[in-house]
Structures are given as C-alpha cells and as structure tokens.
Image (cartoon, rainbow, N blue to C red):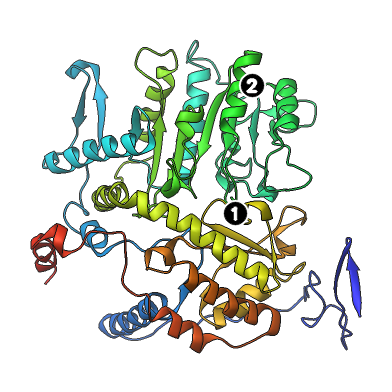
Amino acid sequence: MTVDIRGHEVPGLVVPFHLRSEAPPLARPIVYDHQLPEVELPKGEPAGKARLLLSETLANTAWRQRECVNLIPSEMTASPLVRLASIMDPSFRYAEHRRSEAFYDDEVFYYQGTRFIADVERRLEAELSDYLGCLETETRVISGQMANMAVFSALVEYANRADPKAEPRRMRMVMNNHIGKGGHLSAQPMGALRDFVARDPRTDAPAVVNFAMRDDNQYLIDVAKSEELIARYRPELIVFGRSMVLHREPVAEIRRFLSEQEIDAVILYDAAHVLGLVGPHFQEPFAEGADLVTGSTHKTFFGTQRGVVGSRFAEADERYDLWEALRRRAFPGSVSNHHLGTLLGLLFATYEMRAFRDSYQPQVVANAKAFARALHDAGLDVQGDPTLDFTETHQVIVRVGYGRGYEMATRLEASNILCNYQGLPDEEAFTAAGGLRLGVSEMTRFGMREPDFVELAGLLADVVMHDAAAAGPVTALRARFVDLQFCFGADELGGELDGLVAFLR
C-alpha cells in the first residue's frame, strides 16, 4: 500500500494510533505533555571526568579515522604536519593589525611578538593569490560564512561611500542559487545575506532573485533564462556557488552578458565546496570573470578550518575601494583574534595543495565519476547528467526516496559509511529530504582509487536497497586506507617534524 503525499508515493503503514511515531513520513506526533529524555552528564571530580573524556576522544578518533568511510563532502582530514602546526605557538596569541596611512600604508600590529605570524600571513596571502589566480587575498576570516558576510558588509559600505554619514542603504537586488536547488546557506536571506539586502517593495520579501535552472537537469543553471532575469532585475551582486554542486557554474557566460548589456554587477564565486578543485582540472573563476572568490578551506582544500576571500581588483581600479572596504570588514569588522594556530596550519596545507594539486584534483574527479557510475549500475537513482558520468566535482548525489534521506543516512552510519541526507531540487523542504549527498575527496586523500570506490558502491547499495548490515566489510575496506596521501612526508621534511613533536612532550 502506498500513500500520496503532495504528489509523491510513499509506503503506507496502518498504525493503531493516529499521529504516533509509527506514522508515515512527515507525520510527527506533537503530544502535550511529551518531553525529550535528558542526557545525563558525567559526574565526579574534574580529573575523573577528564579521564573519561580522554577515553571517549580516543575511541571516537579511532572510529572515524580507522573504521569509517567518510563521504561527507564538506569534511577533510588535515595532514599530520598541518595538525601539529595548528597547535604550536602562536596558536594562543593575538596579532590584530590594520593598514595605516600615518605609517606609510604599513600594516600596524597592536601586539609585540608578532613578527613570525605577520610573515606567515604575508606568505599565505601570496600563496593563495597565486593558487586562485588573483591579485590579493584576505585570510583573517575564520570560516566561509564569515568570508561571505565580510563581502556583503563591504558591498553595503561601498554602495554608501558617497555619503557615509547618511543612513546606509542595503543592496537593492541580489541574484543567487536558491537553497532548495543546492545554494549555500550563507548566500541566503535567512543566512549571512539577511542584514545586507533590501526588501522588494512589490513583494515585501528580500530583494533576491534566483538563477533559473534547466528543466532537464535541475543541477545546472539555465543561462538563457537567467540572463532574462538579470536584464529584468539588474542585480548589484551575482553569487555563484553551491553546497550541492555537480557541475561548473556559467561564470564566463554571465560575465559576457553583463558586459554586453552594460550591467554593473559584482560577480562573487563562492568556492567553499570546490576550493580544492579550483584550477585547470575543474574551473578557474577569476579567469572566467569573477570579481571576488570566497571559500572555506577544509572541504576539498586540505584544511585547516578557516575562510578566504580573493580579489581581482588592482589599486588603479575604481572598485579597489570595495577591496579596501572588505579588508576593514575583516578586521575590525568580523574578527579580533583570528586563530593564529590554524592560520599557520593553513599555510602548510596550502604548500601541500600547490605541491600535489595536479595529481590530487584529477583523481578526485575520476573517483567521483567512477563512484557515480558504479552506484548507477547497482540500481541506485544517481542525479546529474549521465553523459558526464553524473558529476564534474567531488560530489555524487543519490535519490533514495521521498522523505527517506534521514533513514538511509542513519542506516549507512550503522554500517560505518558517513554521509549527509539532502533535500533535492524537486522536494519542498529539508524535512522531506529524499537524497544523499556523497563526497569522495577525503577518502581520495586516504588513497582510494576508482576500483576501490566501485567496491564501496556495492556495499553502499546493499545497505540502501537491501537493508544489509555492512559494518564489517566497510571496516575491512577502510583498513586498507589509513595513511594520508598528497602531503609531505619525512623525505621532504627531514627531522624538522620531530622537532615539532618534541615540544608537545
């Protein structure tokens, strides 16, 4: 028996009581006197609680790093070098600074003992600028969401530069990817965009228009229809990038249209999920016409957990004022202490990315394509364009049934396969999620290749389609891949790594 819920057929279930927990998907009991059980916290002396926590920490780390296959596309294990660097001095320090005209436009630091980390920051900016193909980067933001928020704040400051004492206006219109079509939360009116976009007087809703999507592939932007929307609404800001990303974004096409129509819009490419794929093996947003690129540095990039903003504006450009506003909105606008240990770790991670990108990036894409094909061949409903092997990135998206995403993700976790459930473009809300979002980047870095992902696809399909218990086979598979690849080892580092370890004893 099946039941129709808003046009979707779901398995029906006859229950002895109406709206109890046995009811079908999307029916939830809301009972007057029901309370969730309290989670009991540890009791006893601090030392005893510390021992318990240490034991739990070791167990969790062993489980995640030795027994589980991690397919969460927004996660990446950092190398031993990066992890060690992130807890070294100056991880507990401050290094606030800003450029001052009174000091010959030099960066003025407000604390002493900062010469080392100041040099680290300059090196990181140079390395990331070269990696992204841009002129300057801001590295003090500590997340991708903060990076976007700093951009939005800077755009408002820039728009009001002619009369900074007046009540500032917000951005009149923004174009982005809808969150239900995979758009980033940080670029939504409910997210970081909230305080920086005006309200449309015709609808009293936030002044945001979404890219049109293709009818034959809801994961691809319909360029022609989106150009019509741009001509009609003339947005001040266009935001590319998604959290559910299978294909390239049409940056070059939209830049060309803006130039032809003389529409003065800023193009922001949010590379949070694909920062570690940026380059000739995937997409080069600055070369294609982006003005700014933001991202978090720990998804496909090699860590640590921070953010970055890159800019193409030269000092002679009118919009260099926007970049200077962005620097102000980073500090003091967004951060004071910006986690100096992870800044140092990120510089090491960037060296690793630049050293290994030409072997790592194509392997990620090849693994994702092999994984997607194998899941499809096993009978699962893989999303995306089959002529492109369903994906051009690290992500693979599988439809598992309306409202069944959480159930399937939980079932997979019981078999030590970690992913996240996802609302798909034709589903009305996250509560109806019928998809799984899978990413291959972390396991690629642990050494898995195409045949290994084909093997994994069979195990995953058995769990989803046949309710198999696969924890044993999954752990056996993972046991073959426990050493991180695409990172510096003893040959490159010599005895210097031992020197870092010695300080922790």
Q: Find residue 411 and report its horizontal and vertical position in percent.
A: 62, 80
Mark 2 crowdedness (10 Å alpha carbons): few <14, some 14-19, many ≥20: some
User: Quarter-wise, where is residue 431 in the image?
Assistant: bottom right
* Residue 421 found in image quarter: bottom right
Give the number of the mark in front: 1 or 2. 1
**Observer-nearest of 413 and 103:** 413
Quadrant of the rendering where the C terminus is positioned: bottom left
Identify the residue at image location x=69%, y=36%: 211
Give the number of the disc on residue 257.
2
Does residue 384 appear anywhere in the picture?
no
Q: Position of residue 320 (x, y in %)?
A: 40, 18
Q: What amino acid is found at the position of numbered circle 2 in the picture?
A: Phe
Residue at figure coordinates x 42%, y 52% from the top left: 361
**Quadrant housing the N terminus:** bottom right
- Label 1 neighbourhood size at 10 Å, few (<14), some (14-19), many (20+)? many
Specify whether 504 is left or right of 377.
left
Q: Mark 2: which secondary structure?
A: helix
Is residue 292 shown left or right of residue 499? right
User: 304 or 488, which is in the foreground?
Assistant: 488
Residue 62's x, y, as percent? 36, 80
79 relative to 471, above or below: above
Residue 365 screen position, x and y as percent: 49, 55
Relative to 274, say whether 158 is above or below.
above
Q: Amino acid at mark 1?
A: Thr
Q: Which mark is residue 391?
A: 1
Among numbered discs 1 and 2, the one appearing first in the sequence: 2
- The reply to whether residue 443 is visible in this rendering is yes
